[in-house]
Amino acid sequence: MIQKLLIANRGEIACRIIRTAREMGIATVAVYSDADARALHVRQADEAVHIGPSPAAESYLLGEKIIAAAKQTGAEAIHPGYGFLSENAGFAQAVIDAGLIWVGPKPSSIEAMGLKDAAKKLMRAAGVPVTPGYEGDDQSVERLKQEADAIGYPVLIKAVAGGGGKGMRKVDAAADFEAMLESCRREAKASFSNDEVLLEKWITSPRHIEVQVFGDSHGNVVHLFERDCSLQRRHQKVIEEAPAPGMDDTTREDICAAAVRAAKAVDYEGAGTIEFIADASEGLRADRIFFMEMNTRLQVEHPVTEEITGVDLVEWQLRVASGEPIPLKQEELRIDGWAMEARLYAEDPATGFLPSIGRLEVFQLADYDCRVETGYEVGDTVSPFYDPMIAKLIVKANTRKEAAEMLGGASACAAVWPVRTNNYFLSRLAYDPDFQAENIDTSFIAERQDGLVERTPPQEKTLAAGLKELVSPRDCRAAPASPASFRLNAPSKTKYTIFVDGEARQIELSDRGATFWQIIRHGAEVLVSDDDGQLHNFTFTNRSVGGQNSAHDGAILAPMPGKVIAVDVAEGDTVTAGQRLMVLEAMKMEHALTAPFDGTVTELAASEGGQVQVEAVLAVVEPKEE
């Protein structure tokens, strides 16, 4: 068995692996960048090695530094986690060449499944059903446009080296194809250093179904059943569950058998996921489920599989990497209950899901009947350099409806301040009647987005509770708007002038009782959540309350630190309201900045490739004269 393990990752990923390693008696080594010097995974590991500046390209993506850290600390093995170098065949080979144990599949398996076009050809040969499309070598715009026209719109453009929703664009009409192709290629080049793409027919009523597979060096391959990851936003998974709703035993047997064939076709070892797209227009049927790709690593959503099978997949990874066979045979694996996972992101749904960064002054996550995976604690800082996911909330119940109710409650109870999160968005999803009735596909969020993301004014009971807490005897600065006397235990008509979410309000004190998810006193502030988990801020003095900056008076401000990757206009250009002016990349996502109204670009301070700081003025648009 491995005695010392280096984890080539960060955040909740590293913390998750550290937990299992500690339970197995394996010493752990963390690596960290400048931004992560005091991160939770660094604090939890037995040892930690600094590997470079904050940008991932200068630290976590430098394989030679990670291997050097393993040698320096005497680690025998390297676990790549998921993301970063986890699916990099060259890095895997370098680890092996250095005499270390690679906790993952063989480099040849990673390479075989790394390019989506080659993987599809391999899967066809193995008898695995594949989505209709184009995977040819001719990557000219003309040929790709011709093939897209032949497939028929809508069509999906996908980076051959893509993953995690990167390098994917849905094209609804021929007129949009070339612009979408350019955007897809630019993102793919930046993310994967490869701008080649393939085309797929866009599936009607698509469901995203994936199967967890596991292989060992003794020729054994098993599956651990399926997961449904259909609730997505911009191809990024939001809520995952296991098993898949509406999956009958016959279809499950067929899709899981196809996944095992796929793994065996590349002589697979370790944890992997075979991803399928299902045409669910007539329910889940084996003849309408097609191979999309294989993720040659552990998945972010692996906890839901662990919950329904009782298996620790990280433990299996470490045992198999040490040369042991898979601990259980296929016939010993069973589905028990229903599990769901929600990804809690540091982002504001109300502002187009812009990432939110800063210090976690309040960080309270539900722990009742809820498994929490996180790389943060209160007082830690969310930086702009990495993925905005700050926690995963995982629940398990006997039935799907019970699991959905539990997930909605856990999401609503997540209190984070002043960093914004998507917790109320997750809660609304979990409680949605159509979601609970299993009426889902990958367009579920897009079709309901306005109702899911809108921030609503605080409820009357929220206002009453916030004021009552704010003017309690613990705070002697209470200042009523009128000179009337005040007693907490007596009826009163006194109104108080306070600030709620930065807006001045006059509210009458009330002793009405109500049940709340959260009431939190934070210094001079009080935070109260509505039923769906929206946090509202109560103070006696005005202060900004964690919202995102926006364009005002024609000034286009950077909503966060980032890199300008495209500039579409020049000084003097005439623009229309909503027209894209430039694209900012931050926290692994692209964010388009648009004109607030019709007018003229009178100033342009941004240039392609330039780094900008939060609130920097990037451009100024003068309104069109009436």
Image (cartoon, rainbow, N blue to C red):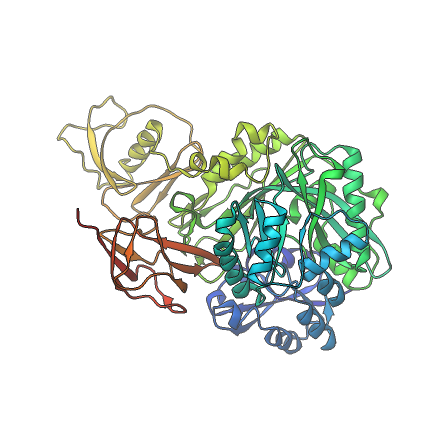
The residue lying furthest to the top in this view is: 491
Q: Residue furthest left?
A: 483
Residue 411 location (% of width, % of height): 50, 39
Task: Tell which of 260 and 461 is nearer to you.
Answer: 260
> Camera-side residue: 222 or 107?
107
Is residue 40 depicted above or below 441 in this figure?
Answer: below
* Residue displayed at 42% across by 55% down: 591
Relative to 250, residue 306 above or below: below
Measured from the top left, where is residue 82 in percent x and y?
A: 62, 58
Q: Is residue 32 above or below residue 537?
A: below
- Residue drawn at point x = 39 percent, y = 26 percent: 514
Quarter containing the N terminus: bottom right
Asked if residue 103 can be seen in this view, the reply is: no
435 to the left or right of 383: right
* In the image, residue 385 above or below residue 300: below
The total number of labels drawn is 0
Q: Quadrant of residue 152?
A: top right
Image x and y of residue 163, in percent:
60, 56
378 left or right, relative to 620: right
Q: Position of residue 244 (x, y in %)?
A: 68, 37
Question: Can the viewer see residue 62 in this picture?
Answer: yes
Describe residue 420's horizontal placement relative to residue 343 as left or right: left
Position of 158 with respect to 243 (left or right) is: left
Q: Residue at x 59, y 57 (%)?
A: 144
